[in-house]
Amino acid sequence: MKLQRFEVESYMTLHENNCRYNLADTCAKPLTLKELLAFEKKDSLGDLMNLSLDYGAIEGSHALKKGILDLYQSGDDEEIAICHGGVNANELVLMTLLSVNDHILSFLPTYQQLYSFPESLGVEVDFIHLKEENDWKIDFEELEKNIKENTKMICLNLPNNPTGTTLNHEEMKQLIQICKKHDLYVLVDEIYRGLYQEESMSDLYEKGIVTSGLSKVLSTAGLRIGWIKTKDKELIRLINERRDYSIISSGPINDYLGALTLKYSKEILTRNREILEENKNYLKKWLKDHPHLSCVIPEYGTVCFLKYDYQIDSNTFCETLQEETGVFFVPGCCFDVENHLRFGLANDPQLVKEGLKVFSNWLKKLDTSR
């Protein structure tokens, strides 16, 4: 099993701890442990101190699963599998359902795991290219034309990483109709869903499988709690069996704090919506003063894809910018799209404003050299 280098994760690892202004992170502003515990009006710290450091609930506590299910319109405990973050959730679904000689359809740009990991399993992958001039939306005619006799699954993330765009109700119905017609699974990485209570594929389609976690919109990436949700209870059973070979359990501390995060998800999401809207409004104004940059600013999600028209490849652009200013973006080349920068929209607004001002001053050098 040979894996391609995970470009975006490798780039983040190399650069995110050596910057002053992290404008690439797609997680909403992280909560501190103190802030999280403050939501509870009882002695949560005392509860933590008295936890037994055993494996905890192997398949996740009822409190944790109940909190997850409250984010959806349907489901029960048997329709949830707990994982080590969203990345482990995707891995478990793909390994459980796909085999050599299966075919899947994925998209570009998107999160690389959704196509490179299946390729490592011997799965045939074809791509549907999302086009910026179409607001990064899916071309459903092209999608259906690429379905083959051995196509088993469509893989995508909604909202999309790195564009932040998603599907409306009619587009979701259109995707489901195609999947039903060809009897396909659809795996939707919904890690950026939830700030605005968008629809979930797992509530709408029997063969819809969604993955998510606490990392992005719930501000607790460090807990490494992710999940899989589907109406297919037999699939959840098979995934839990495979899970015994990888994580066994999430541990009692993460389970307790994850359940606490979900208990106060409404309050956390309200906080993060306010941050996101403030940053989006600032970006819209900022772009008016920068004619060489543009962006399809998404309605949902915590990430967008800035486009620039300078004649510099994106890796050189980002490396030079960070070296000279401390401003950090992920280059579009990590998503096979040049002349773009991934920008996290839900970071601390003060950091975003300061970082964009520094970025503005740096861009003046490029403008004078044109």
Image (tube, rainbow, N blue to C red):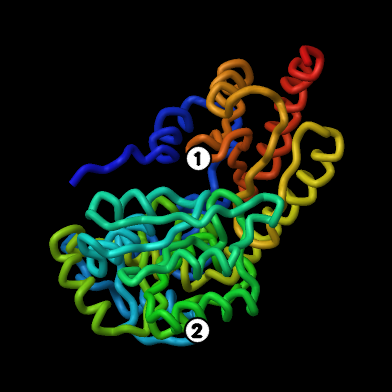
Residue sitting at 46 percent across and 30 percent down?
17
Instruction: Work out which residue is located at the far left of the displayed protein and give it.
Output: 245
Residue type, label 2 = Leu
Give the CA distance from mark 1 to mark 2.
Answer: 31 Å
**Residue that mark 1 sits on:** 336
Task: Using the image as rendered, state which of residue 314 and residue 17 is in the foreground.
Answer: 314
List x then y, in percent, for residue 188: 45, 67
Residue type, label 1 = Asp
Residue sitting at 53 percent across and 26 percent down?
315
Residue sitting at 81 percent across and 33 percent down?
290
Residue 50 can be seen in this image: no
List x then y, in percent, for residue 93: 30, 66
Residue 61, placed above or below residue 243: below
**Residue that mark 2 sits on:** 204
Q: Secondary structure at mark 1?
A: loop
Q: Quadrant of the C terminus?
A: top right
The 10 Å Cα crowd at callout 1, few under 14, some 14 to 19, many 20 or more, is few
